[in-house]
Every structure is written in structure tokens, then in C-alpha cells.
Image (cartoon, rainbow, N blue to C red):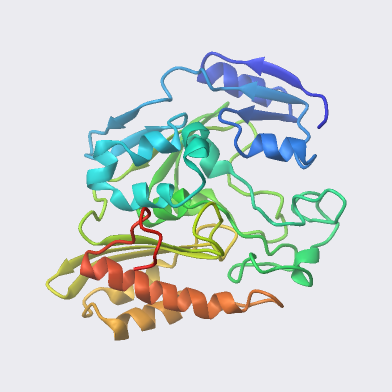
Amino acid sequence: MNRYGYERVTDVAEAVQAMAADPSARFIAGGTNLVDLLKYDVEKPGRLIDISRVPGLDAIEETEKGGLRIGALVSNSQIAYDPRVEQHYPMLASAILAGASAQLRNAATTGGNLLQRTRCYYFYDPDTPCNKREPGTGCPAKDGLNRIHAILGTSEHCIAAHPSDMCVALAALDAVVHVVGTKGERAIAFEDFHRLPGDRPERDTTLAHDEMVVAVELPPDGFAANHTYLKLRDRLSYAFALVSVAAALELDGQRIRRARMALGGVAHKPWRRTEIEDALVGTEAGADAFERAASGLLEGAVGYSHNTFKIDLAKRAIVRALGQAAAGRPQSQVDKRIA
């Protein structure tokens, strides 16, 4: 671990100014991912700006539109067990409970979850090349151990996968990310917050260096009646997703009025294609429609030497998740058996 400076700030404006003044600075709050990266010498900030005590960012509030605004410092546990989230956005609560341990969820923050970095083995090993850690050095994952890596939206420069469960549900719910920077405030559609690797894999998001996540806003409709978060992994506890599916439906009898699907573990960002969701509208909720949706959502998927199995796994997971959502029987994150 390298030496670094440390500064605790007391409000958002001070935090943003401190970040803008130092290109090597990083924000820290829960530290559940960043501290690991410091210990592995992956992240080498010149200064840590501690925002953990900035007031006003630790609450979940109802919005005038009828949704919820979740402050950036709200812990993952607070969200998962908030009665309003449990009642109106159970898919989000389920996705959070599918990830990490209770201890980590108690420390991890909303903003930090959005900014957590890939668990690619090569990214975590500073003795190997990695375009994401050190641009221009190469991507050994393409021909190396790539069981956990992406099958969609990859580039010749990077095949890393995004690790978050919470972000997959937020993508399906059409959440909005609120940020503040030296140029003012802006709202970013969740779809546009994370980015595919392209030729700049070192950049995970569309945030500017001086911008800070202050909240995530949920729209009024949380698809509470018909939803599921299905996570498939190598072991049933404390493992990142090989494939995960956030699926939500609005039904009129057996006809689909609206559909939402987002995938985790398969791309550099939560993977969603709205045209495939639109194609489900008006169809009967059943295996034929769900299989067509799965094929559409996986169109263009490319496997590598150790992860080609993910393509078929994802297709079957999508069909199963849509079936769970249609039946109103979401995947239990307590009973680890796959429903």
C-alpha cells in the first residue's frame, strides 16, 4: 500500500472542490472495495477525501413524484430492510441481499456500490498487464482464465464484467443517478451511468473526475407484484454472479403490458436492451415469448475459452426469471435453492 494524504470534508461543495484540486484524489466512504484495491496496489491515490460524515446524504426520502430518493451514504443494509423498499421495490431489496455478507452490506454505501470495480483476476494482479488498470498494456484475460468474464459488449481492449447486484436491479427499475460537480448538478439515467469498455476500459462510468454521486432516485413504479432477482454463482453464498437476471413484468391477465430485464455478470455494465422488452408487450406470458426474449437479449454474445457456457446459462436464466416474475414467485435470497 502506498502513502497517501487524507482529508475529511463536511459538505458536498467542499468535497467537490477538494476533488477538483487534486487529479490523484479519490472519494472514500464505506471503503469496502477501495481499501481492497489499495492493499493490492491497484489504486494508488495521492489523497483520500473522506465523505462519510457529509450531512444530508444518509437518508431515504419520498419524492414529490411518488418515488424514493436514496442518499449516496445510505448503507446497502438500510436500503434492503427499509419498509418502503421492501413493499414497493422488493426486486431491489432482493438484489442487495443476494450480494456480499451482512457485515459488508452494513458498511457498503449506495454511491460506493455504483462505483465498485471489476473482480477480473488480472485487474487485481499488478504484476500482470491490464488495460483497465494500466492502459495500453494488454488484456491477458482474453486468452487466459476468463470463466467470470463478459460475453456481451466487450472490446479488444477489455472483457471485464461489472460485479454489482444492486446495479442490475437499479438498471431494470430505470433509476436516475444524481451527481454534483464544479459545474453544478446533473441527473444521469442509469443506463448512461456505466459504460462499455471500448478503447477506454480504464473508465467505468461517465462521471467527471470532480463529480460526486449524491443520490439515486427510484421512479414510482417498482413492479412489486411481478418481479424476481435470480443470481447464479459458483457457490450459494458470498460469490459474484456468473449470470444474474433482474426481471419485472406488468400483466393484464396473462398478457404482458410492460417488461423490464437487466443482466449481471455478462458485460462491463448491467446489460439491458429496451427493444427486446418492447417486443414482449402484448404477448402472452409464457415459455415461447420468454425464450424469444432470451435469444434477443443474448444476441451478439461471444464466449471465450472458459466462459462460453455463460451464453446458454444466461438464456436459461432469463426464461426462468421471467417465469418466476410472471408467476409472482420471486427468487428467495434466504432459501438459497434456485426456485
Q: Is residue 40 left or right of residue 335?
A: right
Q: Quadrant of residue 297?
A: bottom left
Residue occupying the far bottom of the picture: 288
Using the image as rendered, state which of residue 117 and residue 239 is in the foreground: 239
Image height check: is 32 above or below 260?
Answer: above
Image height check: is 181 above or below 333?
Answer: above
Task: Please tell me which residue is depicted at 66% across the width and 59% down the height of the picture.
Answer: 197
Q: Judge whether residue 298 can be spotted in this image.
A: no
* Count of numbered labels shown in the rendering: 0
Residue 30 at x, y = what percent? 56, 30
Using the image as rendered, state which of residue 94 and residue 45 is in the foreground: 94
On the rendered image, what quadrant is the C terminus found in? bottom left
Residue 2 at x, y = what percent? 83, 30
Task: Please tell me which residue is depicted at 46% across the width and 78% down the height of the picture.
Answer: 315
Q: Quadrant of residue 225?
A: bottom left
Using the image as rendered, state which of residue 338 and residue 41 is in the foreground: 338
Task: Please tell me which residue is depicted at 33% across the width and 79% down the height of the picture.
Answer: 290
Q: Is residue 289 left or right of residue 72?
A: left
Q: Quadrant of residue 42?
A: top right
Task: Please tell me which residue is depicted at 43% across the width and 25% down the height of the picture.
Answer: 57
Residue 150 at x, y = what percent? 62, 66
On the rendered image, what quadrant is the N terminus found in? top right
Q: Judge whether residue 209 can be spotted in this image.
A: yes
Residue 208 at x, y = what percent? 62, 38
Q: Is residue 22 left or right of residue 82?
A: right
Image height check: is 321 above or below 92?
Answer: below
Residue occupying the far left of the picture: 253
